Every structure is written in structure tokens, then in C-alpha cells.
Amino acid sequence: MAADGALGSRYILVEQIGAGGMGTVWRARHRDTGEIVAAKLLREGLASDRDLVLRFVQERNVMLNLRHPNIATVRDFVVEGDRLALVMDFVEGGDLRTLVHERGTLSPAEAARMVAQVAGALAAAHTMGVVHRDVKPGNILIDGGTGQPKLTDFGVARIVHGPGITQTASIIGTPTYLAPEVADGTGPTPAVDVYAAGLILYELLAGRPPFVGEHPMALLRQHATAAPRRLPGMPDVLWALIAACTAKDPAARPTAGELAEALARAVPSVTGLPALPPVGMEHPPLVTSEPLAWTHPP
């Protein structure tokens, strides 16, 4: 970092507000306007990868043109010495993971509405040929003023790992929401984002994802050999969508646009239904998942 906290010629880094496998997130200020933005600094050393820097530049126009009310807009790309950074809208508030931790579970109507908006954002991205690849509660920010979800980190996985590259590091990073075909080495398609959205809908209703475990390989195995288990009180319409989104065959899943529309239509029918009691992480995996019949040896 520069001595004065500068990021390129336009921004000043104010404070670090997050960190993950892809890099660090900073609250930053635009030098000229004083506006507060979020800066995602990709992890050190990436700028020495010429192919990655080329992808970074190639992704710029796509990311800058990706606009949707439920997407944290990418405003700028910074290439400076050994640093690469994306500058995005700053969303005041926590993320969906924190909300679930605080609330335990959401009511069916609130969960359906939340995921419908996320699915709408994914549909807009998919129309432009952009697959998120890392949809998870930690990448869904909750606007403190409106309560609306804002999907963030679009383009980061594509830049770091390439549009059609599957790397072990990226698989192990967030295996909880990883579609089984990606773990098998298939290039990610829009269906992987829909799979993750279905798991998130389940998590908002149940209080935890259907597939849990301490070891990443155990989680990857569950994605391949188990299905989410329906809990008492899960509304028929939402359970049907969860089952469709988490189908092992990507072709059997709805599109993100279809999911968004179906969830929006479902909201009136589930309004007034109470939130389910949360399932804690201390409960065994089989509370929220069940083995697929075909996985049993003869």
C-alpha cells in the first residue's frame, strides 16, 4: 500500500472491512468527490500472472456494464504495480450470513422474497454471459437502509480462475454451495448459480445449509451423493423449488429468471406462515440431508 493509503490516482483506502480467499475489502474514498466506495484488493502476487492481468482487463467492460438493483455495482478497475483492485458501490450494512446468524431463520415469505431478488440479479448477469460461481450468504450484502440484498463479487472468480478453469483451490474455498458438476471438473454454467441459490433458500428456512461437515471433501461428497431433506413446516411451493434447484442434473434446474418469477409468485401464498425453528450446526448432517438411493452399494 502507498504511504498515504492511495489506491491508484482516484481513491484513498480508509480501513479494511473484510478479508477472504480472493483478497481484502476496504472502505475507500474517492479523492475528488469524497464519496465512500468499497475496494476489493485481489490477493498479493496475482499481478505477476500475465494471463490473470489480461483477464482482469478483458473483464472490465462486462463488469462495468452489469447493472441491476440487486447487484453491488462495479465502478472501476485499478491496475497499479503489483496490485489489482475492483472498486464497487459501498453497501452500508451486514451480509446475509450475519443476518441468518442473528435471526436463526427467516419466515417463508421473507426467504422467498430475498432469494427472488438474488435470482433476478443472477438472471441479469447470465443474460450478459456472466456466471458468478461463488454465490453464498457472505457474498449477499443487505442494504441497511432498504433491507434489499445486493449480490457482490461478480467477476472475481472469473478473473482469478478464468471463465472455464476449475482449480482445486477454488473448489475447496467455499464447498458448502458448490454444484456437484463443478467438483467433477465440468466448467461452470449458469446452473451452478441456481444450485447455490436453492441451497441458500433452504438455509434461510432451516437455519443452516443442507450439507454440513468440517472437512471440505466430506462436503463435496454430500453434494454428489445426498439431497436436501425436507423439514416439517417447509411450504410445498418452496420445497418444490429447492428440490428443482438442487437437482444433480444441471439441465433439470430452472433458469435464474424462472426461479425469480416462481419465488415472486409464491410470496403471497406463504405470507403469514411462521419461521421454522432453526437447526443448529451441532446436529448431525442427516438432519438436513438424506442419501440418494442410487448411491448405496448393491
Image: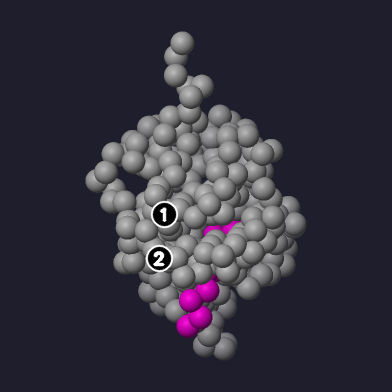
Residue pointed to by mark 1: 233
The one nearer the camera, 268 or 258, is: 268
Q: Quadrant of the N terminus?
A: bottom left
Can residue 94 be seen here? The reply is: yes
Label 2 environment density (alpha carbons within 10 Å; few <14, some 14–19, many ≥20):
few
Residue located at (58% from left, 50% from top): 241
Residue 121 at x, y = what percent?
63, 63
Q: Is residue 211 left or right of residue 81?
A: left
Q: Are marks 2 and 1 in contact (CB under 8 Å)?
A: yes
Residue 55 at x, y = what percent?
66, 51
Residue 175 at x, y = what percent?
44, 42
Residue located at (67% from left, 48% from top): 254
In which quadrant of the rendered view does residue 9 lie? bottom right
Residue pointed to by mark 2: 274
**Badge 1 amino acid:** Gly
Can residue 60 be seen here? The reply is: no
Residue numbers of the magenta segment: 145-155
Q: Is residue 189 left or right of residue 234?
A: right
Q: Residue furthest left?
A: 282
Q: Is residue 270 magenta?
A: no
